[in-house]
Image: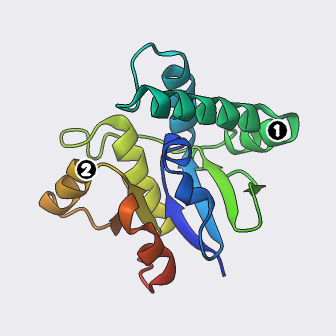
Amino acid sequence: MSKTFIIEAVMLAVHGQLMLPSKPVTYLIPYTTIQELYELHSSPEPIMLEQEDDGFVKQMIGELIAFFEESFNKKKIEKALSIPWGKSPPLPINEHVTLKIVYAIDNEAYGDQFDPIETELILTALKEQAVLLTDQFDFIERLVEFAIPVEAFDVEDFEFAVEGDNQV
């Protein structure tokens, strides 16, 4: 059975281990984080500290954008965008990784403490009863501080999250 995680699209480019899990996983990705890929790809601002790493990550972002723009995948994504909280049919990446795009709607429920993308991640995790995966420790701290009822893991604990019985 596949384990489900809520993540931002850019994390797939930044953290290569997410594409090579030990067990099958499904990543639910809010659509706005796909839109964010275009901004990150064309931005002169570095994503990574090391220039070599930054170039590699931007290349991976370009590959992700190309994947999402493939005709068949684009049609699946557009299907999800027809209704709020719609989900795309599965977009398989490899034998262990499947993506689903979610047309998440930021209802400003957490607008004072979290930015719009963080709010969409939280709401998606709540709606889907799935684990949130992030590389932003301050985001996890704020989830705890404001008692947001979602389970979240740092990307460094990804294998533990995949292996463990930690579904919400």
As drawn, 104 above or below 4: above
Left or right of 110 on screen, residue 78: right
Pointer 1 residue: 75
As drawn, 144 above or below 16: below
Question: Based on the displayed image, in which of its 4 quarters is residue 56 positioned?
Answer: top right
Count up the numbered dots: 2
Image point (39%, 17%), residue name: 45
Q: Residue furthest top?
A: 44
Determine the secondary structure under disc 2: helix
Question: Is residue 126 at least partly visible in the picture?
Answer: no
* Tag shown at residue 139: 2
Amino acid type, mark 1: Lys
Left or right of 75 on screen, residue 117: left
As drawn, 59 above or below 126: above
Gap between marks 1 and 2 measured at Cα = 32 Å
Question: Residue 48 location in percent, x, y?
Answer: 39, 32
Image point (54%, 16%), residue name: 42
Q: Residue furthest bottom?
A: 165
Q: How is the image coloured?
A: rainbow
Amino acid type, mark 2: Phe
Whichever of callouts 1 and 2 sits on the residue coming sooner in the sequence is 1
Question: Is residue 105 at least partly visible in the picture?
Answer: yes
Image point (35%, 51%), residue name: 135
